[in-house]
Image (cartoon, rainbow, N blue to C red):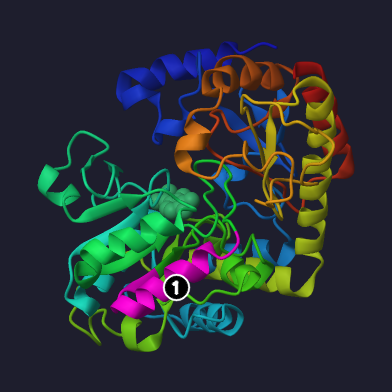
């Protein structure tokens, strides 16, 4: 595979952009390939190499790189008509109505421009609503590039997880392990009256994928209710992907007070949103006193793309298709692992999939969850499969990044470059893409 043009572009990029990229995950080793264009479930790089693309923009692209015709024309007409104004438009109202109609917990919604902006605003809103400062987060959870959640350590000893954040910010954050009801109960016993919110991804999807154990979210719901704290589901990645248009909260049957959205909601354009109970969301200015504002918020092109995206999914067999391909991949990879790498755990649900390079072989390789880890206590792998962010971090992460990812790329399969981020099927992918990918897994594992 020739990468001459990508190498030259990266060389130029390094002179004018830190690390040569605008988002750190893109700086793959030894240098990233630059994309020239998308084509259905594939991308073509600057040197003309073609890859099956399971990265899908890290989550937003439910249709791959071929948008359905109604989405295309919605984008074109709104781009031509403006593109934006600084005054409200009809399409914002329509998109808000669509989300409120399909997501059970959402009565009212504020659109913003990224998942990060959504979680920043949700934390501010929760603090304003409750008059409390502390937020509980999950170790290994991800809520974007924001000060209150880029915090590591434990509830007893939190610390910023990056340079540039004062220790005094991290003092208000309480990181606990995911899937550990005792730890959640303990943090509420200790700090209950000071906790504004629990922020949780319904499925750890940026460190995993890790499914919740049975009853975990119900425990969080009860603890929040008992202590007057808000339960915030960060559905930036699971929203409109897991559980279809009802999102992961409908799949799990748990009702959060607030939900953050992003990714798919913008139909491929920058987006975020905070939705939830109207009495809380109306705390945002101008109806309430928690300041929130944005020049590009509710951008007409984004709203039009997002609305057309979701409407198309409501009217076509989109989730059926992407979930079927997801299952084919998870089952196919499970079979290959059972043969060649029985220590590895296949994870994911709906249209998400990943293989965690765990280290221990279960006693009975054939008596495991089918089609992705379900945290089923009867599964032979139950004691070995990842349940927390730390479990994923202790897998063979280097092997994924330095050997496996590279060799899959050389075979024309584009996966997420590190062990932690998940992969996605899209409406544009075909069974042939799945077969080609499984053949590459068989070669490389
Ligand atoms: C991607 C993601 C974010 C951040 O969204 P950006 O649009 O990248 O700022 C926040 N939370 C979760 C769960 C995400 O997956």
Position of 355 with respect to 212 (left or right) is right
- The vertical placement of 189 against 253, above or below, is above
Identify the residue position indicated by label 1 in the image: 221
Instruction: Point out residue 381 in the picture as x, y percentages from the top left corner.
Output: 70, 39
Position of 265 with respect to 13 (left or right) is right
Instruction: Point out residue 45 in the picture as x, y percentages from the top left corner.
Output: 64, 26
Disc 1 secondary structure class? helix
In this rendering, the count of numbered labels is: 1
The answer to which of 432 and 144 lies nearer the viewer is 144
Position of 32 with respect to 2 (left or right) is left
- The vertical placement of 291 against 266, above or below, is below
Residue at 34% x, 79% y is: 226
The answer to which of 248 and 115 lies nearer the viewer is 248
Q: Quadrant of the C terminus?
A: top right
Where does the magenta region start and end? Answer: 214-231
Residue at 77% x, 55% y is: 323
Does the image show residue 93?
A: yes
Position of 83 with respect to 379 (left or right) is left
Residue 299 magenta: no
Q: Quadrant of the N terminus?
A: top right
Please rate how many residues cluster around mark 1, counting C-alpha atoms within 10 Å: few if below 14, some from 14 to 19, many from 20: many
Q: Main secondary structure of the magenta part?
A: helix
Instruction: Point out residue 215 in the picture as x, y percentages from the top left corner.
Output: 56, 65
**In the picture, residue 33 is in which quadrant?**
top right
Residue at 61% x, 31% y is: 36
């Amino acid at each position: 595979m020739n990468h001459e043009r990508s190498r030259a572009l990266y060389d130029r990029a390094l002179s004018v952009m830190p690390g040569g990229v605008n988002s750190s995950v893109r700086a793959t080793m030894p240098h990233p390939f630059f994309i020239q264009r998308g084509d259905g479930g594939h991308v073509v790089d600057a040197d003309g190499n073609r890859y099956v693309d399971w990265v899908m923009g890290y989550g937003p692209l439910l249709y791959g790189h071929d948008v359905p015709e109604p989405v295309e024309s919605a984008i074109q007409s709104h781009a031509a008509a403006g593109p934006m104004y600084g005054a409200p438009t009809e399409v914002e109202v329509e998109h808000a109505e669509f989300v409120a109609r399909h997501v059970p917990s959402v009565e009212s919604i504020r659109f913003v421009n990224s998942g990060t902006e959504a979680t920043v605003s949700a934390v501010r809103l929760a603090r304003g609503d409750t008059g409390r400062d502390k937020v509980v987060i999950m170790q290994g959870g991800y809520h974007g590039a924001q000060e209150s959640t880029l915090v590591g350590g434990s509830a007893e000893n939190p610390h910023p997880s990056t340079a540039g954040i004062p220790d005094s910010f991290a003092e208000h954050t309480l990181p606990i392990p995911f899937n550990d009801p005792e730890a959640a109960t303990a943090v509420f016993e200790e700090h209950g009256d000071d906790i504004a919110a629990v922020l949780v991804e319904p499925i750890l999807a940026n460190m995993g994928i890790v499914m919740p154990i049975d009853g975990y979210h119900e425990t969080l719901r009860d603890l929040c209710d008992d202590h007057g704290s808000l339960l915030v589901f960060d559905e930036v990645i699971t929203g409109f992907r897991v559980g279809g248009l009802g999102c992961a909260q409908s799949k799990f049957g748990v009702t959060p007070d607030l939900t953050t959205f992003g990714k798919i909601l913008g139909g491929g354009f920058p987006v975020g949103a905070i939705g939830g109970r109207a009495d809380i969301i109306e705390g945002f200015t101008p109806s309430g006193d928690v300041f929130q504002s944005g020049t590009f918020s509710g951008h007409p092109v984004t709203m039009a793309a997002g609305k057309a995206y979701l409407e198309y999914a409501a009217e076509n067999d989109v989730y059926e298709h992407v979930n079927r391909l997801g299952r084919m991949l998870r089952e196919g990879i499970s079979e290959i692992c059972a043969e060649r790498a029985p220590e590895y755990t296949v994870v994911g649900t709906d249209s998400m999939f990943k293989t965690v390079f765990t280290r221990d072989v279960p006693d009975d390789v054939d008596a495991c969850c089918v089609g992705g880890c379900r945290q089923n206590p009867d599964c032979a792998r139950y004691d070995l499969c990842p349940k927390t962010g730390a479990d994923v971090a202790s897998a063979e992460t280097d092997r994924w990044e330095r050997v496996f990812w590279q060799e899959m790329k050389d075979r024309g399969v584009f996966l997420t470059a590190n062990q932690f981020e998940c992969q996605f099927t899209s409406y544009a992918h075909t069974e042939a893409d799945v077969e080609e990918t499984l053949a590459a897994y068989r070669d490389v594992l």
